[in-house]
Amino acid sequence: MEFHKRYNHLGYSFPSVPEGWMPIVTKAVADIEKHMWPQWLPWYVCNLIHWLATGNSVVRIKYRWAFNLRQRLTKGQMITDIKEKYATLRIYGSFCSEIDEIIKQAVRACNETCQECGCKGAVDRVYAGWVYNLCARCSRKISDDE
């Protein structure tokens, strides 16, 4: 199942992050789900509640009763955006301290991972019209393209 369909009930879960970081982001979002929604509730029910509450939006309320139910179940937590900005992973939203720690670990892991190929280790910030977090091989590939 596609990432954004599986984790739609968390809020905005269609990340615009580089391919090399997707395993890290997928793990972080799965960990966030464990802290955000009750474990006894199946994910498809969470998706339904989220859809009834917000219409799969982060700025709209579709049905007030469903929104109140979602707020009670999640303690008001929601992801509002997932993206890469200035070669750093960004996950925005309203969270508890446990979820903040999950996000910090994911950001640290992404800072040590090439955003193109996903290799770990010797990764540098490269400024080539955009800021990239790349290994030496991917950095050469970008510089050869210019």
Image: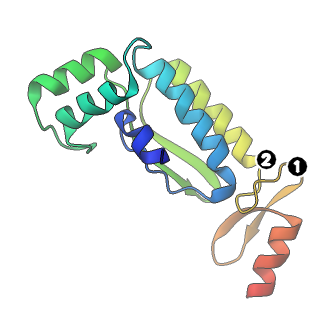
Given the image, on which type of amino acid does mark 2 rest? Glu
| In the image: residue 131, left or right of residue 37 | right
Residue that carries the numbered disc 2 in the rendered image = 112
Report the residue that reaches farthest toward the top: 40
Residue at the spot 85% in from the left edge and 76% down from the top edge: 140
Residue at the spot 48% in from the left edge and 48% down from the top edge: 2
Reply above or below: 112 against 11: below
In the rendered image, which quarter is residue 101 located in?
A: top right
Reply above or below: 73 against 112: above
Residue that carries the numbered disc 1 in the rendered image = 121
Please provide percent x and percent y for residue 77. Answer: 37, 26
In the rendered image, which quarter is residue 109 located in?
A: top right
- Near mark 1 (Cα within 10 A), the count class, few <14, some 14-19 or many ≥20, is few
Labels 1 & 2 near each other (Cβ < 8 A): yes
Please provide percent x and percent y for residue 122. Answer: 89, 54
Residue 17: assigned label: none
Please provide percent x and percent y for residue 7. Answer: 43, 37
In the rendered image, which quarter is residue 95 located in?
A: top left
Residue at the spot 83% in from the left edge and 49% down from the top edge: 120
Please provide percent x and percent y for residue 134. Answer: 78, 62
| In the image: residue 44, left or right of residue 13 | left
Q: CA distance from mark 1 to mark 2?
A: 6 Å
Q: Is residue 75 visible?
A: no
Reply above or below: 97 against 12: above
Dot 2 lies on which element? Answer: loop
Given the image, on which type of amino acid does mark 1 rest? Gly
Report the residue that reaches farthest toward the front: 1
